[in-house]
Image (cartoon, rainbow, N blue to C red):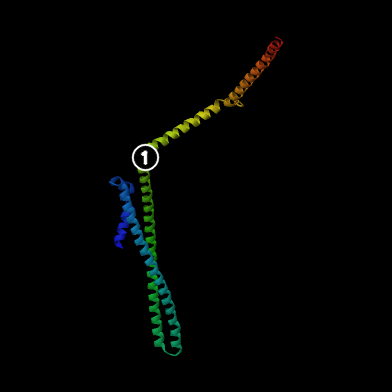
């Protein structure tokens, strides 16, 4: 128990960043420290469970001894009623002895309550340290993964910059256009449609104009 207490103080007081800066393999060192914390927590939880069981037994024993002690008061009265002062005195002495034993058991149970509170505080400190180490391991893993994919990280940053530029260009275009102005794309399409319609009408007019001349020529050929 003393060894565990000393080791707990060392773990809780340790500075994770300092340990990482001094370690050749930070992630491996943190994994070892995490494993040691978990083993220590298992031992402490076991100690706490045993202390709770012992406390429960002491409390039950204290209550039983206190109840038995008070029974001697009634026995002393019976002895007095029968003129046996010696028996009454012995009964009262026995009662006091039982009360003392009950008080001792209760005091021991109270002492275990203090130990349990200390254990709970130590366990909480270790849980916090384990959480901090787990977070640092996750950070190291992310850093290693990012370092292993420099091209992907660069591409991602480039994509973000391009998206940002395109968004700014769209916003600039919207800002320059007057309120209620038609969309340039749709306006161009409408003008192209008008040009096509004009060309068709012109071609149709040319066909109509050519039709009478062709008919006159055909008639003169028949008369000849």
User: Where 144 falls versus 111 (above or below)?
Assistant: above
Secondary element type, mark 1: loop
Is residue 87 among the parts visible in the rendering? yes
Q: Looking at the image, which is closer to me, 118 or 102?
A: 118
Residue sticking out furthest to the right:
223
**Among the 4 quarters of the image, the one containing residue 193:** top right
Along the viewing direction, whichever of 211 and 201 lies nearer the viewer: 211
Q: Position of residue 182 (x, y in %)?
A: 60, 26
Q: Residues within 10 Å of mark 1 (few under 14, many from 20)?
A: few
> Can residue 109 be seen from the camera position used here?
no
Name the residue at 35% across, 57% down: 38
**Residue at left offset 39%, top offset 67%:** 52
Residue 155, image x and y in percent?
41, 35
- Residue highlighted by disc 1: 149
* Quadrant location, the C terminus: top right
Query: Looking at the image, which residue sits at the far front?
Result: 224
Tell me where residue 172 appears, x and y as whole percent.
Answer: 52, 27
Q: How many marks?
A: 1
In the picture shown, does residue 102 fall above or below 28? below
Compared across the picture, whether 207 is left or right of 176 comes to: right
Quadrant of the snapshot with the N terminus: bottom left
Nearer to us in this view, 20 or 143: 143
Report the residue at 36% width, 46% height from top: 141
Viewed as shown, does residue 172 lie left or right of 115?
Answer: right
Of all residues, the one furthest to the bottom in this rendering is: 82
Task: Give x and y (percent) for residue 46.
Answer: 36, 64
Instruction: Examine the image and state in which quarter residue 108 appears.
Output: bottom left
Q: Quadrant of residue 157?
A: top left
């Amino acid at each position: 128990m003393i060894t565990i207490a000393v080791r707990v103080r060392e773990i809780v007081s340790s500075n994770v960043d300092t340990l990482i800066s001094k370690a050749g393999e930070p992630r491996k060192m943190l994994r070892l420290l995490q494993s040691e914390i978990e083993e220590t927590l298992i031992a402490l939880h076991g100690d706490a469970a045993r202390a709770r069981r012992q406390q429960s037994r002491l409390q039950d024993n204290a209550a039983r001894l206190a109840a038995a002690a008070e029974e001697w008061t009634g026995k002393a009265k019976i002895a007095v009623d029968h003129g046996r002062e010696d028996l009454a005195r012995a009964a009262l002495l026995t009662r006091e002895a039982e009360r003392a034993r009950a008080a001792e058991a209760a005091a021991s149970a109270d002492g275990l309550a203090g130990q349990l509170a200390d254990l709970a505080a130590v366990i909480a400190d270790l849980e916090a340290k384990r959480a901090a180490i787990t977070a640092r391991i996750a950070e190291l893993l992310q850093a290693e993964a990012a370092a292993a994919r420099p091209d992907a990280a660069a591409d991602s940053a480039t994509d973000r910059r391009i998206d940002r530029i395109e968004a700014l260009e769209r916003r600039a275009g919207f800002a320059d256009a007057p309120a209620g102005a038609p969309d340039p794309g749709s306006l161009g399409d409408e003008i192209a449609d008008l040009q096509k319609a004009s060309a068709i009408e012109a071609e149709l007019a040319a066909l109509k104009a050519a039709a009478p001349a062709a008919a006159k020529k055909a008639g003169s050929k028949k008369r000849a």
